[in-house]
Image: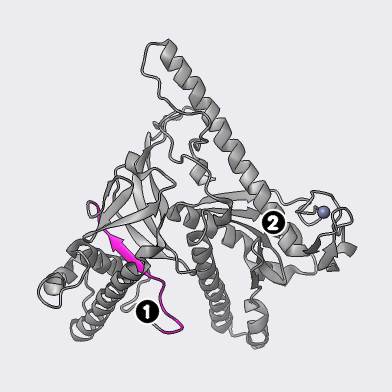
């Protein structure tokens, strides 16, 4: 059997995420309020047009209505391309969710939408370590070396802690030895380790926890009664309901996690093995593998590293001194708090595991960065010998290898 070899792509699109300095917070938030205004205007218009004509609007259809928004006395601060992009994003989301109307974006109150300001290609410009957007120069913590890339479309987004990021797509060369994407590992402070569990769905290395949801258990009585009375449609509907609720919950959780960190490390806990035991329903309810899949692609979208870490022994090892002094085996499962015999540090079982997962994940990344650095150093040397221009690719700076962003 012969198979035609498809040529390997030489370029790929990646999203780089760069933290915007806090002094621009207020200004970016005011832009985000305008984006919400435009979004809600589109939503309102779509609802009314649909009521009248049963017609769904495309992004382009909104343009004439938004024409005057950036001119005159009441002009928006947003550049016209950002207004258009907001309308187009609205139309795309509406289509994707097959809905006539979407949720309103709220600029205030307890359920405020996190700030978001989209822009099109050629609306931002980079020079001397800053980016120019909507008439202002913004300072950044440029961990990627944005100057080396052509900046395409993207957005500014706010995370749950009120920090702002620039997420911008760039085209990168993915041939082996091509110029690297990342000059250095991001600060450990922006990295997080996540221990997946049953009682707490997720325990993070910073001590935060996410309680497991009981979608299945909550709906079980209704499901049982529908099954007993042979209502097949009702059973189907209930299963769909459980699925939707779980997906919705996991989407919100993973979006926040991916957006607020540069590195996300997750244990490789195996749901299948556990699903056979007495915790079967809780395991299936937890949705670990769905969560990992979502985290993987959301991290790729947000420009964060995603690392899946072998979690064997992460509960047992003390994250402070590395001794295997923690609870062990089946009888150890009920031990929530323990103190290390060696270094006397008191631990919460899951937080300790999450910290070990974080340390392992960062070690895996560092190893790959170092390996990529060596590969490039070798190539540079070969190029020099061959009389070509060797790139002065400092081997000490760990760049990522091909596909590392797809970890
Ligand atoms: Zn210890």
Q: Which residue is mark 2?
A: 355
Q: What whole-number distance in Å separates the C-alpha atoms at marks 1 and 2?
A: 37 Å
- Residue 20, percent from left and from top: 39, 58
Packing grade of label 2 (10 A; few <14, some 14-19, many >=20) is many
Colour convention of the picture: one colour
Judged from this view, the residue extending furthest toward the front is 23
**Residue 284 image-quadrant placement:** bottom right
Q: In this rendered view, identify the residue nearer to me: 261 or 83.
A: 261
The answer to whether residue 156 is above or below residue 100 is above
Q: Which residues are magenta?
A: 109-121
Query: Label 1 neighbourhood size at 10 Å, few (<14), some (14-19), many (20+)?
Result: few
Identify the secondary structure beneath mark 2: helix
- The residue positioned 69% from the left and 70% from the top of the image is 200
Residue at horizontal 78%, vertical 57%?
315
Instruction: Determine the image quadrant of residue 319.
Output: bottom right
Write down the residue under mark 1.
103
Disc with the residue nearer the chain's start (1 vs 2) = 1
- State left or right for residue 72 relative to residue 319: left
Q: Is residue 134 left or right of residue 299?
A: left
> Who is closer to the viewer here, 218 or 343?
343
180, 94: nearer the viewer: 180
Viewer-nearest of labels 1 and 2? 2
Measuring from the top left, give residue 47's x and y in whole percent.
26, 82
Q: Residue at x 51, y 28 (%)?
A: 395
Question: Quadrant holding ligand 1?
Answer: bottom right
Q: Is residue 391 magenta?
A: no
Is residue 115 highlighted in magenta? yes
Residue closer to the observer: 134 or 276: 134
Q: Residue furthest left?
A: 72
The kind of secondary structure element at disc 1 is loop
């Amino acid at each position: 059997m012969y198979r035609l070899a498809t040529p390997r792509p030489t370029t790929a699109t990646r999203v780089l995420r760069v933290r915007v300095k806090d002094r621009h917070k207020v200004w970016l938030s005011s832009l985000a309020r305008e984006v919400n205004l435009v979004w809600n205007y589109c939503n309102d218009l779509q609802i009314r047009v649909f009521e009248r004509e049963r017609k769904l609007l495309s992004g382009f259809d909104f343009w004439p209505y938004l024409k005057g928004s950036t001119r005159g006395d009441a002009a928006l601060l947003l550049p016209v391309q950002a207004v258009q992009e907001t309308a187009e994003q609205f139309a795309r989301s509406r289509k994707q969710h097959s809905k006539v109307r979407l949720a309103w974006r709220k600029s205030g109150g307890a359920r405020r939408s996190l700030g978001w300001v989209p822009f099109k290609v050629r609306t931002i410009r980079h020079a001397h370590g800053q980016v120019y957007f909507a008439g202002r120069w913004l300072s950044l913590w440029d961990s990627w070396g944005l100057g080396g890339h052509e900046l395409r479309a993207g957005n500014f987004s706010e995370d749950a802690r009120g920090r702002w990021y620039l997420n911008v797509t760039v085209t990168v060369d993915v041939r082996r030895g091509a110029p690297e994407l990342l000059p250095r590992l991001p600060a450990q402070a922006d990295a997080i380790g996540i221990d997946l569990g049953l009682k707490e769905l997720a325990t993070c290395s910073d001590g935060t926890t996410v309680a497991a949801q009981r979608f299945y258990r909550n709906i079980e009585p209704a499901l049982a009664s529908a099954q007993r009375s042979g209502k097949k449609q009702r059973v189907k509907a209930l299963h769909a309901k459980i699925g939707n609720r779980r997906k919705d919950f996991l989407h919100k959780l993973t979006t926040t996690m991916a957006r607020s960190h540069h590195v996300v490390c997750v244990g490789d806990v195996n749901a299948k093995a556990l699903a056979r035991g007495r915790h079967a329903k809780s395991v299936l309810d937890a949705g670990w593998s769905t969560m990992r899949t979502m985290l993987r692609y959301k991290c790729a979208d947000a420009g964060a590293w995603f690392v899946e870490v072998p979690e064997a022994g992460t509960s047992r090892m003390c994250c402070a001194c590395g001794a295997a002094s923690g609870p062990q085996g089946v009888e150890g499962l009920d031990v929530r708090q323990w103190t290390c015999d060696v270094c006397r540090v008191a631990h919460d079982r899951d937080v300790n595991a999450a910290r070990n997962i974080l340390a392992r994940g960062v070690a895996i990344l560092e190893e790959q960065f170092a390996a990529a650095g060596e590969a490039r150093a070798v190539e540079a040397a070969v190029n020099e010998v061959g009389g070509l221009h060797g790139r002065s690719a400092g081997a000490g700076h760990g760049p990522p290898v091909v596909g590392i962003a797809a970890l």
